[in-house]
């Protein structure tokens, strides 16, 4: 039944991954981008550069969130917390360089 939840947004996410060449890794209830991202040069950002993001709609995915948070600054890592049903848990973490 989880495959039928939010199918349109899941398909948009897959198309975005293919179009941009971005690879997301899902481990331990979170889906991760970067750490470092493909174009990163240099050391990881220092402590204190991670931002908590709360109250996200559960049907929004990285194809919308990553470009939004990249518009604020250079994104080193983005972690979206996920449920077993395939929805996000309503919060994420962004680390900036």
Image: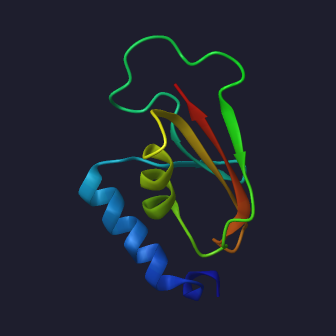
Residue at position x 35%, y 32% from top?
Answer: 38
- Quarter of the image for residue 44 reads top right
Which of the two residues, 61 or 56, is positioned nearer the viewer here? 56
| Colour setting | rainbow
Query: Which residue is depicted at the point 72% across and 54% down?
Result: 29
Outermost residue toward the front in this view: 72
- In x, y percent, where is residue 22? 36, 47
Position of the N terminus by quadrant: bottom right
Q: Is residue 34 left or right of residue 39?
A: right
Please give left or right for residue 73 compared with residue 30 in the image: left
For residue 55, above or below residue 94: below
Q: Residue at x 47, y 55 (%)?
A: 68
The x and y percentages for residue 45 are 57, 19
Residue 32 higher or lower than 14, as above or below: above
Residue positioned most to the top: 43
> What x and y, as percent, mark residue 16?
33, 62
Report the residue at 43% width, 61% height from top: 63
Q: Give coordinates of residue 65: x percent, y percent.
A: 51, 58
Q: Using the image, determine if residue 1 lies above or below residue 58.
A: below
Count the marks: how many? 0
Q: Residue furthest left?
A: 19
In this rendering, position of residue 53 left or right of residue 34 = right
């Amino acid at each position: 039944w989880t495959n039928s939840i939010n199918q349109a947004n899941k398909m948009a996410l897959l198309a975005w991954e293919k179009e941009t060449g971005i690879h997301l890794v899902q481990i331990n209830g979170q889906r991760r981008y970067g750490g470092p991202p493909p174009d990163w040069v240099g050391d990881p950002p220092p402590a204190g550069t991670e931002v908590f993001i709360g109250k996200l709609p559960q049907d929004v995915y990285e194809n919308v969130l990553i470009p939004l948070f990249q518009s604020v600054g250079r994104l080193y890592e983005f972690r979206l917390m996920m449920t077993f049903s395939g929805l996000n848990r309503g919060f994420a973490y962004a680390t900036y360089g």
